[in-house]
Image: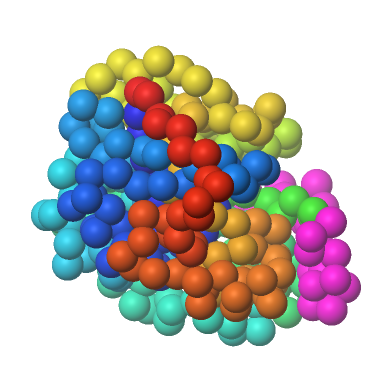
Amino acid sequence: MILNASGRCDICGYFMPWLMNRIKAGYADVRNPFYPKIVHRIPLDHEHVDGIIFCTKNPIPALGVLDEIPWPILFYVTLTPYKQNMEPSVVDKKLIIEAIKELSDKLGKDKVIVRYDPILISPEYSVRYHQMMFKRMCEQLNGYVETIIISFLDLKKNTLMNQRKYQYRTPSLQEIHELSASFALSAKKAGMKIQTCAEQVDLTAYNIDNLPCFSEEIAYLLTGKMLKHKRGQRKECECIATVDLGAYNLCAHGCRYCYANYDAHMIHQNMKKHDPLSSLICGHLENDDEIRIREK
């Protein structure tokens, strides 16, 4: 199996000591997000784990412990052009750029994929703004990154209040094509390719293919194994399923567009429950929990 750290919260950004403790312990416990009294125990050993992917907006905490992670590593680093009004607690983007370069030097540029995601439009974040910032990003990461994944904002009911307050929206079809044409030129000059994942719009005219962000091919390059293809939860996504070690509403970045971590009060309470010595990323096991051992 492939571990995901994490699509639910930023384990790399906030909980690397916990993850390293779990690796040493040989297992981690994960509450079922829909049935919280069911706890899945995930064995963390070479027999069960083939590799680990980090989905993060802050890879810096991982830089000093890469050699202690016993499996092949792949990073998806989300690098967006938004300011603190939209991402209140995200680390300075200049530091993230430097961290991406360091990861690329240590792991190889094929093991560090950048996500420019999500793309939203507002009075402050216009098409022109995105075109300028994407070009700058490509110039700064030239030689360090091969692939950039772009996606466009999906509006969810969890973000309706923030959407009204910060006046952001999904790009129109015309704006998507304007952005894609400009992005493609910037990426080509920097020797990079762009792809989407699970997007409905056809952007192949700009050499932007709609591909799984974690495909069988990428899994093989990461692990050297042909893994059995199990699809993830999203119907429109062809990515290989991974085992997520995280929990929802446990990310303190505070991004105004996030639908996985949307309840500020709950996030604050959950962050206080985190114990780096616990087997769970949030809280502790309880007497009436049902523990189910995860197989391969």
Relative to 145, 207 lies left or right: right
> How is the model colour-coded?
rainbow
Q: Where does the image place residue 293, in percent across and percent down from the top left? A: 40, 31
Q: Is residue 171 magenta?
A: yes
| Relative to 255, 280 lies left or right | left
235 part of magenta stretch: no
Name the residue: 67% across, 43% down: 34
Residue 271's spot in the image, x, y percent? Answer: 52, 73
Mark count? 0
228 and 175: which is toward the camera? 228
Question: Whole-percent x and y of residue 110?
Answer: 28, 42
Q: Is residue 138 visible?
A: no
Query: Nearest the camera: 258 or 139?
Result: 258
Above or below 217: residue 91: below
Residue drawn where x is 50% and y is 51% of the image: 287
**Position of residue 103 measured from the top left corner of the image (x, y, whole percent):** 23, 58
Is residue 225 toward the left or the right of residue 91 in the image?
left
Q: Main secondary structure of the magenta part?
A: helix
- Read off the magenta span: 157-184
Does 118 appear above or below 251?
Answer: above
Quarter of the picture holding the N terminus: top left
Give me the residue at 13% from left, 54% from top. 68
Q: Residue at x 51, y 77 (%)?
A: 272
Name the quarter where the C terminus is drawn.
top left
Relative to 204, is 187 above or below? Answer: below
Q: Is residue 11 visible?
A: yes
**Residue 104, placed above or below residue 166:** above
User: Hey, which residue is sitting farthest left in the picture?
Assistant: 67
